[in-house]
Image (tube, helix red, strand yellow):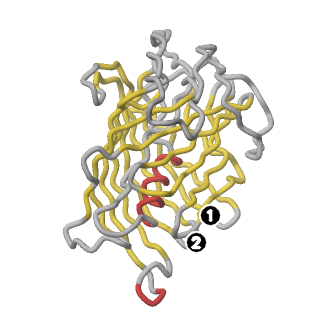
Amino acid sequence: MTNRFVAALFASALLFAACGSGDDVDPAAAGGPSPTAEGQDGDDTDADAGTDDGDPSGSGATTAPGGASATQAPAATPAPVKKASEGEVNRPRAGSYVYDLDGRGTGPGCTDPNGCATPDGATSTDEVSYSGDVMTVKTTSSEGSGATTTRFRWEAKRLLLLQIRTDTAFGSFGCTFEKPVTVAKFPIKVESYGKQTWKGDGCEGSSTIEIVGQEDVKDASGKTWKTWKSNQDTVYDFGSVSGTIDGMQWQSPDLGWTIRSQEESDGTITGGGPGGTGANFQVEGTTALKSHP
């Protein structure tokens, strides 16, 4: 099973690093995508592939258009989640995965020496879309204007991370990996993927991925899901932003998506402090699935 992907881990640190003032803090993006044994082969790892809102799972799930009025009819109840075969993980449906967000952090814009906490009702959302074998995930938060976009490519025996980009009021950071990072292997089993080093234009780092085992966990509504637990330690340097992130996530092989996540991260923004000096940030956060397509 995949662990907390590089993309989701980066999102928390970079979005918080550029968050606003007062108690506004974006400590975590929701968990990254989950793999399926039904991925297709492909030799092209070009991260520039386009995206759309198609649903390769055949569920017919779609994303509601923007600008909907407050009087819009309630969304339809999601189709039943299909049970995954032993050792496999269903491919996640296209659409919105919404999470309750809870956390505390220090950094630019936070004036409380004990850290700024997320307000009640804070959420984060993963918007998933597909173009062929390329899956795009856009992560946003109710507590910040930033967005992180990541692209992955499905292959028969692995899932690859191709590209990541975070856009915030503070600035934009990103990486197109010279060699795609393996974030999942099929079939899913308890194992360590070992330390993977990576680099791109203006970025470098490493990630250590470990699939720990299976656990039953509850989502935000109290529903129990069978999940795979995974750990990931990441060290990254984007030039203007660098740091470390330690994360855990619990993902359902049936839903193909994260049910819960937990992480701790710390780092430095070059020129992000008073007078252009460096500024440090620290974040602790958790997410719990609230709704899914």
Horizontal and vertical percent position of residue 87: 49, 15
Q: Tell me the quarter of the picture where residue 24 sits.
A: bottom left
The image's mark for residue 135 is: none
Indicate the amino acid at tag 1: Cys
Label 2 vs label 1: CA separation?
A: 7 Å
Using residue 14 as the reference point, say whether residue 63 is left or right of it. right
Q: Tell me the quarter of the picture where residue 106 sits.
A: bottom left
Q: Tell me the quarter of the picture where residue 158 sits.
A: top right
Residue denoted by label 2 = 239
Residue lying furthest bottom: 275
Horizontal and vertical percent position of residue 216: 28, 22
Q: Residue at x 42, y 50 (%)?
A: 233
For label 1, the crowd category at 10 Å Cα-Cα, with few meaning under 14, some 14 to 19 and many 20 or more, is some
Question: Can you say whether 53 is above or below 165 in the image?
Answer: above
Q: Residue at x 40, y 66 (%)?
A: 20
Sequence-wise, the earlier of marks 2 and 1 is 1
Q: Which residue is drawn at 55% across and 51% down?
A: 148
For label 2, the crowd category at 10 Å Cα-Cα, with few meaning under 14, some 14 to 19 and many 20 or more, is few
Is disc 2 placed on a helix, strand or loop?
A: loop
Residue denoted by label 1 = 203
Q: How many marks?
A: 2
Of residues 49 and 204, the one drawn nearer to the viewer in this rendering? 49
Q: Contact, CB < 8 Å: mark 2 with mark 1? A: yes
Horizontal and vertical percent position of residue 60: 61, 16
Of residues 138 and 224, the one drawn nearer to the viewer in this rendering? 138
Using residue 194 as the reference point, say whether residue 24 is left or right of it. left
